[in-house]
Image: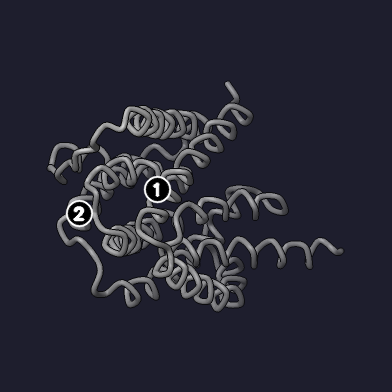
Amino acid sequence: MSQEILFWVMAALATFLVGASKGGLPGVGLMGVPILAQVVSPVYAAGLLLPLYVVSDWYGLWLYRKNYDAWNIKLITLAALIGIAIGWATAQYNNDALVKVIVGLMGLWYTADLIWKYSRKAEVIPKPADVPRGIFWGSLTGFTSFVAHAGGTPYQMFVLPQKLDKMTYAGTATITFAFINMLKLPPYFFLDQINLASLERDIYLAPIALIGAWAGFRLTRLLPEKIFFRCVEVALFLLSIKLLWDGITTWSV
């Protein structure tokens, strides 16, 4: 298989998973950059996929137009703007590996705490979406999303404890990251991670992103609520391990 054909195969798979995540399917979107990074540089992969995130985001906005929590969207998006600004201002100093290690450890801590509570059959009391925690986790969501496309983990650590219903949780995540990804576009252009050549390739991949979003939405609706949230928690655990592993193996001092 030629390198060009291999690129398009990997790009199509990564794009489909990105779209599926925007349809509400938990965890699969973070696999996009690592898959595409098998054939191109991680920086190029992140820049190529960001417009496809945005395309599927806008379809997700329509899919979840009736299922969302407005307060969470406002709070996290405004806080994420702080994190994105910090990420942009410190772009030349950011250590992607360190960010992945920290986010991975936080995700493992959260899921370990859940496992402990489940093993003791302790009642998990819903936490409100309060402003101090929202600013902290929202800023971290924006920063890690900008630096490493890893905003899902801190987002989940703020929203999962609220115990929203399945469709509201999925819709809130889709709409929130639609705004966050739009906010990331200008810095990515200025840093030349998005350019005319990458956008030309995105035109061909965009339909696959939309198909993925539709498929993710259908699967989200079909999954029973308890199974859906178990999938979210398992995905968070596995992705945290992956982030930790990627961070450790790519660390350079």
Q: Amino acid at mark 1?
A: Gly
Question: In which quadrant of the rendered image does the C terminus lie?
Answer: top right
Q: Is residue 237 visible?
A: yes
| Helix, strand or loop status at disc 2 | helix
The residue carrying mark 1 is 152
Q: Quadrant of residue 114?
A: top left
The residue carrying mark 2 is 72
Position of 247 with respect to 136 (left or right) is right
Q: Residue at x 44, y 55 (%)?
A: 26
Q: Quadrant of residue 48?
A: bottom right
Q: Is residue 145 visible?
A: no
Residues packed near mark 2 inside 10 Å, few (<14), some (14 to 19) or many (20 plus): many
Q: Amino acid at mark 2?
A: Asn
Q: Residue at x 14, y 37 (%)?
A: 132
- Could you give the CA–CA distance between mark 2 and mark 1, rounded to whole angstroms? 14 Å
Q: Nearer the viewer, residue 92 or 252?
A: 252
Give the vertical position of 244 relative to 6 (above or below). Answer: above
